[in-house]
Amino acid sequence: MAQVLEFKLPDLGEGLTEAEIVRWLVEVGDVVAIDQPVVEVETAKAMVEVPCPYGGVVTARFGEEGTELPVGAPLITVAVGERPASGADDAASEGSGNVLVGYGTSEAPARRRRVRQERPVSGASAAAGPTGASAAAGPTGAAAAPVHARAEGSAAAGATQAGEPSARVNGQAIGLGADDGPIPVISPLVRRLARQNGLDLRELTGSGPDGLILRSDVEYALRASVQGATRATGAPAAEPHPRVPQAPSQALASRSSAPAAPGEIRTPLKGIRGAVADKLARSRREIPDATCWVDADATELMRARAAMNAAGGPKISLLALLARICTAALTRFPELNSTVDAEAREVVRFDHVHLGFAAQTDRGLVVPVVRDAHARDAESLTAEFARLTEAGRTGTLTPGELTGGTFTLNNYGVFGVDGSTPIINHPEAAMLGVGRIVPKPWVHEGELAVRQVVQLSLTFDHRVCDGGVAGGFLRYVADCVEQPAVLLRTL
């Protein structure tokens, strides 16, 4: 007898809480193998193909293409252990465990059945059938609402062996409050945000799976507090919460723009555009930044690059040479290769350089990260820049390739502009901006000449250093641009 298993949208990592369905890779009735990709989704960071941990026959899909689903909402249901009409071999009934960050299927089948039989949130009636799977309404299953497992245990039953109270939501440990039992919060960032603003998390009703309190819940409560409103547990809000759990078919509509007035065109801030907006706003809000800049004669740098490329072998990009200069400068001025832990009031300095670089794509601005850039030569940097840039253009960058940077290089000269005041890529401490290289009048060796001139700008977090360090870094970069032989000291 077949067992129907429900596969939910897994945790995609890096604090992502939702994803948009871009393209279904399977149809209802298709036979899928374990770990076969079943849907392509777009997060705020990248396009991701989501593999299904079960093998069997697809019995329902949840959400049309273009629908935005929260983490934990059902994606598909799969009948496992049933022989398809085609006569194929029985599908495996065990999950592979190889899904995505924070999500696994290697738990015992009995536990999976127990979780599936839990009551749905919002008081919806339990799904019929011995397996507890949601009933499918037509090929897309649009009428079925997400079913989430409730938090297991209580303040008494959830105590760990070490005596520390705990509970679990979707397989992840959550902390228990000292007074009224569990506070369903997984993210330490959410806790910190609430603590910094004096907000009691026990007063919130979470909008995530099983009542999980998300960052949006805290931000919503803070906005309501500023407006003089009080949002108590269980009380109806004055306006709809942006992340109230809904059926997948309603998710996109509920997050759409307000009605546009005549002459207006409204575009939702979501996906990459929304993530960029949030990150830039946070950078401006939290980082006391300052900018310094200098003009530099890049004639010798351009000649050095031409000589390298004339010598044969792979071509060296200008961006790679600038990156090599950056890593050398960060060795001399490591204060700028750091971040600020505001809660601990500490500057955290890194002994490695994971270099981000801004890349404009059809999907928006992305900042891929070159790992261990300090250990790479110009040829290796060129190849990695090319690989990541192409992945950015095709939308195949992984979340891991878009996070973890310690310093960012921004070549906005490709847009034909001379200068800019970059916004720091939070939570980093600095960004170097490079303008276009153009012929300009320049005093060279005491005489007026036409030289290749570039403007360099450095935006830095004034908490990690003062102007002397920032100016020293920028001056060293400019010296290397003007006299590339300076770099020989660090080779």
Image (cartoon, rainbow, N blue to C red):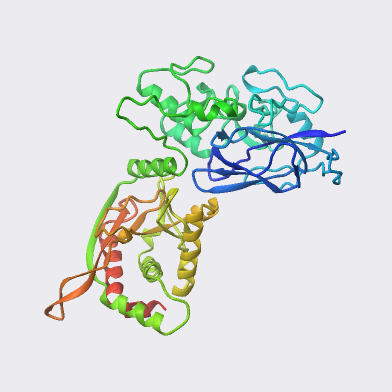
Please determine whether, in this image, residue 126 is positioned above or below residue 450: above
Task: From the viewer's side, name the closer residue of 110 and 69.
Answer: 69
Task: From the viewer's side, name the closer residue of 403 and 490.
Answer: 403
Task: Write the residue at 36% across / 26% down.
Answer: 260
Residue 180 picture location, percent across and down = 59, 21
Which quadrant would the N terminus be assigned to in this image? top right
Residue 152 position by quadrant: top right
Residue 223 visible in the displayed image? yes
Which quadrant would the C terminus be assigned to in this image? bottom left
Please determine whether, in this image, residue 152 is positioned above or below residue 372: above
Task: From the viewer's side, name the closer residue of 304 and 373.
Answer: 304
Residue 338 picture location, percent across and down = 41, 56
In the displayed structure image, the side of residue 138 where residue 265 appears, left or right = left
Please determine whether, in this image, residue 65 is positioned above or below residue 133: below
Residue 114 picture location, percent across and down = 77, 29
Task: Write the residue at 54% across / 48% down.
Answer: 47
In the displayed structure image, the side of residue 321 where residue 203 appears, left or right = right
